[in-house]
Image (spheres, rainbow, N blue to C red):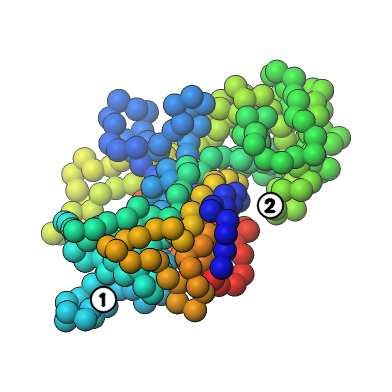
């Protein structure tokens, strides 16, 4: 029996491939297929909805909630939107479906919002090429909200090396932007990110981070293939943006308890785990997120893009 009502967990993830989550075709942009950006900072992000959509499909895979035979003889699939009126979701609450309950479902006469609430993934450390190899750039705003031991400061139009390996550099280039070392302060020791990223991390101002990121995004050119002939369509060359490989992202998920929920007149029960609490919801979602690093998120999956390794998944169930 759990009595906590919710748990918020902050996740850290590294892009194993370039990641493209499209903003929808906007021909006015410098590329044909731009990615989604945060309006305030102009930094690319991955919307929570695209992560929860992928996680839902992968939790369904790992818990065998595809093509289920229901008691009524119909076939159900708990992945996806559940058909037009949600008639394909199983909507089971006792025992709770490991997909429908964490991610939500609609069954016509009754429905429920998912107990897992995904927030957008933001860039924490952006991987960029420099004369000394790859370095990871961040800013005070990007690191805001994390429990760091020190406050963060950096001079405008300068960089401050957070990592040991860059301490003796007086100048560094970030793509084509060259900066001098300035005064600053910051400690990222406690973050659960790869040691190499910490060693080669650099702090810049929020304004500079946006400039560095937006001038170092991957822009690729591809060609549309005509499905009828299998050859390139005439004039079908297009460009698209992506968050580069090696970038560290962070995102929060709020796991709610379902212990006071009544759905269709029934209480939620987790098989073998008592009431449905935040820990059970988290365990189901993390089963799905484990597959982000194999099957990827976002678009362009068939073009070798989108794999994301979540760095701090827990072990265990319930
Ligand atoms: Zn279900």
Residue at 47% x, 65% y: name it: 276
Q: Is residue 273 above or below residue 41?
A: below
- Closer to the camera: disc 2 or disc 1? 1
Q: Is residue 82 above or below residue 216?
A: below
Residue at 65% x, 34% y: name it: 144
Mark 1 neighbour class, 10 Å CA radius: few under 14, some 14 to 19, many 20 or more: some
- Measured from the top left, where is residue 164 in percent x and y? 83, 43
Horizontally, is 182 left or right of 193 in the view?
right
Residue 270 visible in the picture: yes
Horizontally, is 180 left or right of 281 in the view?
right
Query: Considering the numbered disc 1 on the image, is that residue within a helix, a strand or a loop?
Result: loop
Residue 97 visible in the picture: no
Horizontally, is 290 left or right of 153 in the view?
left
Residue at 45% x, 49% y: name it: 117
Q: Which residue is mark 1?
A: 67
Residue at 31% x, 70% y: name it: 92
Between 68 and 292, the one nearer to me in the picture? 68
Q: Earlier in the sequence, mark 2 or mark 1?
A: 1
Between 222 and 158, the one nearer to me in the picture? 158
Query: Considering the numbered disc 2 on the image, is that residue within a helix, a strand or a loop?
Result: loop
Q: Which residue is mark 2?
A: 193
The Cα–Cα distance between marks 2 and 1, rounded to whole angstroms, is 38 Å
Q: Residue placed farthest to the left in the image?
A: 228
Do the CB atoms of the residues marked 2 and 1 lie less than 8 Å apart? no
Between 138 and 118, the one nearer to me in the picture? 118
Between 306 and 93, the one nearer to me in the picture? 93
């Amino acid at each position: 029996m759990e009595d906590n009502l919710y748990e918020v967990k902050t996740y850290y993830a590294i892009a194993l491939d370039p990641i493209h989550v499209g903003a929808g075709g906007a021909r006015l942009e410098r590329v044909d297929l731009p990615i989604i950006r945060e309006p305030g900072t102009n930094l690319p992000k991955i919307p929570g909805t695209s992560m929860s959509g992928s996680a839902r499909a992968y939790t369904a895979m790992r818990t065998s909630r595809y093509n289920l035979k229901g008691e009524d003889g119909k076939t159900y699939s708990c992945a996806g939107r559940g058909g037009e009126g949600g008639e394909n979701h199983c909507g089971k609450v006792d025992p709770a479906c490991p997909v429908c309950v964490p991610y939500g479902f609609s069954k016509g006469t009754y429905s429920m919002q998912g107990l897992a609430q995904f927030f957008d993934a933001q860039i924490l450390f952006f991987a960029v090429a420099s004369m000394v190899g790859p370095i990871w750039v961040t800013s005070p705003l990007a690191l805001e909200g994390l429990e760091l031991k020190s406050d963060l400061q950096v001079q405008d139009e300068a960089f401050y090396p957070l990592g040991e390996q860059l301490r003796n550099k007086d100048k560094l280039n970030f793509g084509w932007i060259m900066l001098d070392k300035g005064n600053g302060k910051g400690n990222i020791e406690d973050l659960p990110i790869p040691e190499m990223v910490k060693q080669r991390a650099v702090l810049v101002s929020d304004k500079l981070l946006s400039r560095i990121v937006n001038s170092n995004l991957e822009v690729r050119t591809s060609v549309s293939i005509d499905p009828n002939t299998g050859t390139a369509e005439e004039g079908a060359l297009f460009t698209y943006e992506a968050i580069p490989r090696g970038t560290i992202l962070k995102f929060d998920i709020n796991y709610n308890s379902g212990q006071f929920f009544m759905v269709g007149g029934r209480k939620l029960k987790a098989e073998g785990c008592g009431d449905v609490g935040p820990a059970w919801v988290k365990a189901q979602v993390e089963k799905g997120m484990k597959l982000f690093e194999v099957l990827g998120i976002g678009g362009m999956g068939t073009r070798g893009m989108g794999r994301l390794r979540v760095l701090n998944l827990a072990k265990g169930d319930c």
